[in-house]
Image (spheres, rainbow, N blue to C red):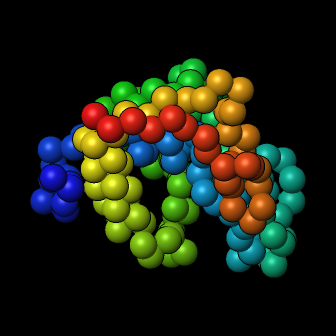
Amino acid sequence: RAAAAADMERLPLIQRIVSEALRLYPPAAFLSRAAQAHDRLCGREVRPGDTVMLPIYALHRHHLLWTNPDAFDPDRFLTPPDRYAFLPFGAGPRICIGAGFAMQEAVIILATLLSRFRFTAIAGRAPEPRMILTLRPHGGVWLNVARR
């Protein structure tokens, strides 16, 4: 059967897989904010109104925050990451209003697909991440799909 919201508690592995995919390939690969007050950031002056860019893609792969940061390892989410080390939906007052719904839908859809189909990579067709406002796979994602 198709997974549903009531199944979320029984899908912790799928939840970790979705989180790890969002860590490696955050849809919004960077955030920008206007500074509200004078400050110093990494030794640089930041004045009110300056734009500060936060590269989420780089943050999610930073070796000081993540062990083996370029590897796909859903088990790294067995314990919650540091509050500002994992920001696939942003943070603070401008966090994505649909973050919880998006996570729930992604888990339900992935669980449903995996229960019905087997997916294997196509040799030579690895997705290439490209930043075009959002991070997306250039040329799409090519997979062989077979019924279970």
Q: Residue furthest top?
A: 68
Q: Residue 86: image x %, image y %?
A: 51, 47
The answer to whether residue 79 shows anywhere in this view is no
Q: Residue 37: image x %, image y %?
A: 73, 74
Q: Nearer the viewer, residue 35 or 87?
A: 87
Residue drawn at (84%, 47%) of the image = 43
Is residue 90 toward the left or the right of residue 112 in the image? right
- Give residue 122's quadrant in the image: top right
Residue drawn at (32%, 38%) of the image = 147
Does 44 sit above or below residue 35?
Answer: above
Q: Nearer the viewer, residue 44 or 121?
A: 121
Residue drawn at (53%, 55%) of the image = 88
Residue drawn at (77%, 55%) of the image = 131
Does 126 sit above or below residue 10?
Answer: above
Q: Residue 52: image x %, image y %?
A: 77, 64
Number of disc labels:
0
The answer to whether residue 92 shows anywhere in this view is yes
Q: Quadrant of the C terminus?
A: top left
- Give residue 129's quadrant in the image: top right
Q: Residue 145: image x %, image y %?
A: 45, 38
Q: Nearer the viewer, residue 143 or 68?
A: 143
Is residue 33 toward the left or the right of residue 12 in the image? right
Q: Nearer the viewer, residue 82 or 23?
A: 23
